[in-house]
Amino acid sequence: MQVYFNKNKINKIFCNTNFSTIIKTFVNNFIKMKNKNLNISLEGNILKGLFFLSLPILIGNFLQASYNFVDAYWIGKISKEAVASISASFPIIFFIVSLGTGFSMAGTILIAQYAGAKNKEKLDKTASQTLTIDVFLAVFLGMIGYFSSESILKLLKVNDNVIIHALPYLKITFIGLVFSFIFSMFQSIMRGVGEVKLPMYIILATVILNFIIDPILILGFGPIPAMGVSGAAIATIIAQFISAGVGVYILFKGNHSVKVDFKNLIPKFSFIKKVFFLGLPSSIEMSIRSLGMVLLTGIVTYFGTVALAGFGAGGNIFQFIFIPTMGFSIAISTMVGQNIGAGNIKRASQIAKTGTLITFVALEIIGLFIFIFAPFLIELFVNDRETIKTGVDLMRISAFSFGIMGIQFALTGVFRAAGNTSLAMILGIVSMFVVQLPIAFILSIHLNWGINGVWWSFTIVNIIMAIICVLIYLKGNWKNKKITAEEKKEIEIDKSVSTFKK
């Protein structure tokens, strides 16, 4: 399909040299806060601390998600098959990436707790070792993803006219996976020490770059040929390569509370063992969730290309929901982890309660907005009427359970921050395989609800899992987890030496 766009308008937008300055000035004026880092988490007003910590994370996540929004907008101008190819690709990418995510999360948990304990030596070593593990995992998982993409697409019964777009997109994405992993780890390290603004500025710069090159590579411009869906993947890799390079440079400079150096990059078995046992449950959890999404996509595929394209369009809106959800969850998890590391369990509990309430209220308001404006939002990504209706149904059926979903994610973040990754793993397995997948299958196929049966499974699983998480939180066992018993003694010794010196 030939797609035309107004070159004069594109030139007018792209050639505006003040565009970057305007955005950065807006962000700077909007976020007027002092760099208090750990003091925000460990002292003072909890609501204010959550706001200062979560706001840059939210803005950074919105900017990062704009990669996908821009991709979806331009790909939507090609065909519904192109849109469906992204829908089919996402759970596969998510599944491969999630195999290594848990080990990165383990490093982040340790970083937050060492930052709270003010143990600079262990903080630097942990950041360096985690970065090493991350690179090895990215290369290994990228190879698995590259060579298994076609088999997985065929296993999911994806139509051949969709595979034509999806396969090159997947292969290009997996080639650049290492850059994505490195910058993600950089973000996690910075957040662990309370430095949340810096990653946001890096994302801002690369988003502007992606905004410029995305339509050029997807649709073609002048001597540059149209690359379609593959162009979107290439544009993203270019942006991620730059962000990863800047992140690594900053970590080696060591001017932001944590420093990576070459001697600490050499893999140490004792640390790898610690990260393995702490991160394995999180990796299993994320893998189970993503495998569940692959299987759920298989159920959606059963209802045809329109259902899959509608799922993809709705998925773009879902990202708007996951951005504040994960932003609040990361802020809560960071503050809870730092306070647990500092031995302040009472404040950690107060942060958990306040953060969960804020997350619930914010996401319910967003849910109301999406319920009202669902048709307009879906039309941003697709122009096929049948696909629009399918996407609108998904949004409106699930809209009012967004706040309830926020409760689940906020409390799961609390459990992880306390080092209770096994509990988060069990909740992930129950959520996907015990609740959502059986309900989606029974409602959509067995009870003949059609694709709406899959949509209703999102609402039902959110309600059930939120209730379970609240009950576990109220029981209070999560408070008993903290790094390791041996390290508790080390922290106490460090504090005693510090007091003696004074």
Image (spheres, helix red, strand yellow):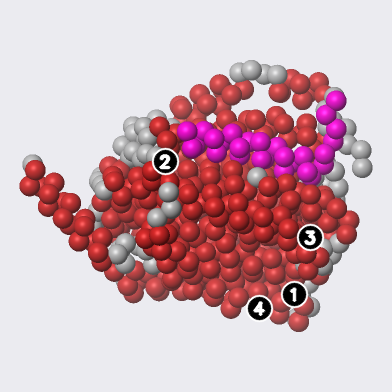
Q: Earlier in the sequence, mark 2 or mark 1?
A: 2
**Label 3 vs label 4, nearer the camera:** 3
Kind of residue sitting beneath label 1: Ser
> Could you tell me which secondary element the residue under label 1 belongs to?
helix
> Can residue 33 be seen from the camera position used here?
no
Q: State the residue position of label 2.
A: 262
Let me know if residue 52 is in the magenta part.
no
Nearer-the-camera pick, 145 or 187: 145
Q: Earlier in the sequence, mark 3 or mark 2?
A: 3
**Label 1 vs label 4, nearer the camera:** 4
Main SS of the magenta part reads: helix
Within 10 Å of the Cα at label 2, are there few (<14), some (14-19), or many (20+) other Cα atoms? few
Q: State the residue position of label 3.
A: 150
> Could you tell me which secondary element the residue under label 4 belongs to?
helix
- x and y percentages locating residue 6 in the rendered image: 83, 26
**Label 3 vs label 1, nearer the camera:** 3
> Could you tell me which secondary element the residue under label 3 belongs to?
helix
What is the number of the mark on residue 173? none
State how far apart marks 4 and 2 are (Cα).
49 Å
What is the number of the mark on residue 438? 4
Kind of residue sitting beneath label 2: Phe
Figure check: 109 above or below 28: below
State how far apart marks 1 and 4 are (Cα).
10 Å
Please give the range of residues in magenta: 223-249
State how far apart marks 3 and 4 are (Cα).
27 Å
Kind of residue sitting beneath label 4: Pro
Question: Can you name the residue that lies furthest to the bottom here?
Answer: 446
Q: Are marks 1 and 4 in contact (CB under 8 Å)?
A: no
- x and y percentages locating residue 303 in the rendered image: 82, 68
Nearer-the-camera pick, 94 or 458: 94
